Amino acid sequence: ATEISWWHAMGGQLGEILEEMTQDFNESQDDYHVTPSYRGTYTETMTGAIAAFRANEQPHILQVFEVGTGTMMNAKGAIYPVYELMEAHGRAFDNEAFLPAVVGYYTDTNGNMLSFPFNSSTPIMYYNRDMFEEAGLDPEQPPETWQEVADFSRQIVESGAASCGFTTSWPSWVMLENFSAWHNLPLGTLENGFGGMETELNFNNELVARHWDNLHDWQEEGVFKWGGPGSGPDSEPMFYSQDCAIFFGSSASRADVAANSEFEVGFGMQPYYADVEGAPQNSIIGGATLWAMQGHSDEEYEAVAAFFEYLSQPEVQAQWHQQTGYLPITQAAWDLSQEQGYYEDNPGADISLKQMTLNEPSENSKGLRFGNFVQIRDIISEEMEAVMTGDKSGQEAADDAVERGNDLLRDFEAANQ
Ligand SMILES: O=P(O)(O)OC[C@H](O)CO
């Protein structure tokens, strides 16, 4: 069989589910064999692949998180656009089959899909229903606004049900990128970068500054706990261990939350500030897509195309969605999950979809497309951390993040003229 390698960043339960899914493909036929390889975090996986490409040791398939999209799209000699790959090997690939939010995020200006949509997520709220009850709160009523998050958290901490109200993973993704879309506010000019490389970040508005200041104040008060920059690695464990009663994280934390939580879990939408007109708008996707890398043989690309076709089958997609909490990225997988009664049997499993489709996306809420955004996101979470340590106000940190981020955008523009 033709061997192909797949570098990915799925650890924990997600990694196990991915391994099983690949094994199913390998066992479904005799011509191709895919070997998945866990390469650490999304950033580590992407950095490792860039180094491997320079040494001509790149895998056939690389999983890249959504913020790496702008960089990958411009890495012309390194990537084999997926629409070309599928066409060259006579495999079905229909943009229309994917949910509009996914297609919009990953197509180039000509409407071509450059990478293969695989695991798209969106941040949701998880809460400990047992703790809500213990604190005298109604477990059927998760907080809807940030005011309620703060009030409920205070009640939880004061009642002794938990030592912390809430925490968050991926602080930039949740508390800036999705926060902005949810409140219909821009991250940058030119439709958050979709309109061209001359885009400039401009998210340093009053609401973002206010929210970051609030996070700081809530932390001082003991209501909020910072789980670290980047992916916020400490936050999910604080939810499992019942330190924090509420956790904001990827819809795909669902698999790990289910496996590790010895309590009843509730699910809710992202909160909003009630004084912001038009909020909540809609949430944006995260997660990752699969990129085919240049430098391999035709025979091997034939195998990659066959694997991608397999992954987009409704049954395979629906199973992945249901096991992980990632979105059903095709309409057929969504319909199938509905027919199978998945949402009825699993209350809260459709929160991610409700958030994505709450309103027709505006130019502030269809996603983001910035070059060098992997590095820019690191800067944003570093600046947010400076707010948490009391070194900067929300406004100072947002201003500095915008200024430093714009320098990286200009570097990217200059390098890709
Ligand atoms: O944990 P994931 O795969 O849902 O991804 C979350 C963020 O979008 C990563 O950039």
Image (tube, rainbow, N blue to C red):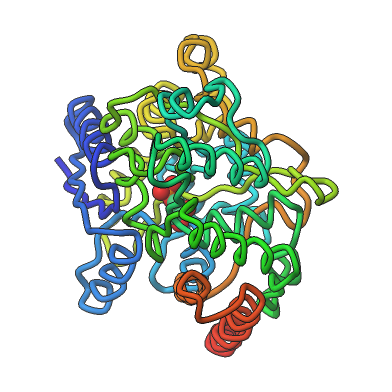
Please say whether residue 288 is visible from this viewpoint: no
Q: Which residue occupies the foreground of this view, 116 or 329?
A: 329
**Residue 384 appears at what percent x and percent y?**
51, 70
* Residue located at (28% from left, 68% from top): 49
Where's the C terminus, which quadrant?
A: bottom right
Please say whether residue 168 is visible from this viewpoint: yes
**Residue 365 appears at what percent x and percent y?**
70, 52
Q: Is residue 231 left or right of residue 241?
A: right
* Residue located at (43% from left, 53% from top): 169
**Residue 111 appears at what percent x and percent y?**
66, 53
Quadrant of the rendered structure where residue 22 is? top left
Total numbered labels placed on residues in the image: 0
Q: Is residue 392 above or below residue 222?
A: below
Q: Is residue 60 above or below residue 382?
A: above
Quadrant of the rendered structure where residue 203 is? bottom right
**Residue 337 appears at what percent x and percent y?**
49, 18
Q: Give the residue at the far left of this rendering.
A: 1
* Residue located at (52% from left, 22% from top): 139
* Residue located at (49% from left, 42% from top): 121
Q: Is residue 184 above or below residue 45?
A: above
Q: Give the residue at the far right of this rendering.
A: 277
Q: Is residue 195 above or below residue 272?
A: below
Quadrant of the rendered structure where residue 261 is? top left
Q: Which residue occupies the foreground of this view, 28 or 399?
A: 399
Where's the N terminus, which quadrant?
A: top left
Q: Is residue 82 left or right of residue 259?
A: right
Q: Which residue occupies the foreground of this view, 115 or 118?
A: 118
